[in-house]
Image (tube, rainbow, N blue to C red):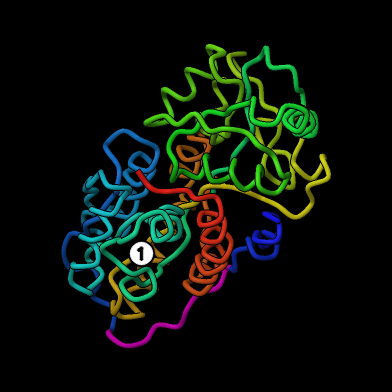
Amino acid sequence: MMKSLLPKILLASLSVTFLSTPASGQDASGFPARPITWIIGAAPGGGSDTFARVVAQAMSVNMKQPVVVVNKPGASSMIAAEQLKNSPKDGYTMFTADNGTLVYNAALFPKIPYDVKKDFDYVTLMTKIPLLLVANPGFAPRDYRSLVNLAKSQPGKLNYASPGTGTPHNLATQFLLAREGLDVQAAQYKGGGPAVQDVIAGHVPFMVLDSISALPLVQAGKLRAIAALSQKRLAGFGDVPALSESGVADVELFAWQGLVVPRGTPASIIEKLRAEYAKAVQDPAVERKIREMGVETITSSREAFQALVDREIGTWHPLIASRGIRGE
């Protein structure tokens, strides 16, 4: 019964269109004439912050105006999103929005201080961060199908580590549990660090983890990767089977981030920001730094970004409601 509530995540729906959007409205030839603020809904030092600072530095040089990263952590990025919503519609304030901000929050919380359809204009998708199923090295299953079979043979007895109810990691796990009809309990943690440590220690057998966090731990032998939640094997995880190799041919699960501005920002300014972002991430020095972070960069049209958000809402909102998942 649960499966009928889950739309398929088709690979076509996850493709990104590399198109530019014709400029219209306000002339962008003099933009920017002063510093640009880049809001991050996370604390300094994390992946989102580090990525933004690397790109912001390159954009500052190219545009000959400072791009200043400002951290506004807390409340599942809702504090940062509300600040963007209330900012002038002139292109001088932009925000890193992710799955949580644009998709999950509206389903996880009874009320949020913004409307993704009315308050934001989409500039470009920026990053795609693959997810993997990882386990304690002593956990018996060696592949995805073996784990599914074990869980089916022991309903309600297995548990998994979750970095938080509204994270891509937890929701990807819930998607797979619903798809396979499994009864596996969540051990909820306040953040990825404690969750990972308990899997390493063997207190919880497995979890879904992003590729950036997983790579050094798998290489060190502290965790074992069971499956890449993708249709192809991942760079850095060449010996880890993709979901498609276990008969799951229509699913690809990943975290993503995009750049947004207040709704009503002139189209020509949005296109200028999109072009400057694309130029920055194509710089060889920037490209090298980002690659070392384990992040895959994306450049998209506004329309492709909007379409992805719409499709993800159609996938995740029914899942969140049917599983009774609530924000923290």
Q: Nearer the viewer, residue 224 or 64?
A: 224
Q: Name the magenta segment's main secondary structure.
A: loop
Dot 1 amino acid type: Val
Towards the viewer: 284 or 211: 211
List the single residue furthest toward the bottom.
25
Asked whether 60 or 71 is in front, the reply is 71
The mark total stands at 1
Q: Position of residue 27 (x, y in %)?
A: 28, 83
Q: Residue at x 46, y 50 (%)?
A: 283
Q: Residue at x 45, y 31 (%)?
A: 188
Say left or right for 301 vs 265.
right
Q: Position of residue 193 (x, y in %)?
A: 42, 24
Q: Is residue 27 above or below residue 228?
A: below
Q: Residues within 10 Å of mark 1 (few under 14, many from 20)?
A: many
Give left or right: position of 242 versus 254: right
Q: Quadrant of residue 157?
A: top right
Q: Assign a secondary structure to mark 1.
A: strand
Quadrant (top left/top right/bottom left/bottom right) for the N terminus: bottom right
Which residue corresponds to the image point at 38% horizontal and 62% vertical from the top-left?
276
Residue holding disc 1:
260
> Is the C terminus in the top left, top right, bottom left or bottom right quadrant?
top left
Q: Residue at x 58, y 61 (%)?
A: 315
Residue 105 coordinates in the image, percent (x, y): 39, 56
Horizontal side of 32 relative to 318 (left or right) equals: left
Based on the displayed image, in which of its 4 quarters is residue 19 positioned?
bottom right
Answer with the quarter of the image where residue 280 lies.
Answer: bottom left
Q: Which residues are magenta?
A: 18-26
Rendered position, 248 above or below 307? above
- The magenta stretch spans residue 19: yes
Residue 50 relative to residue 289: left or right: left
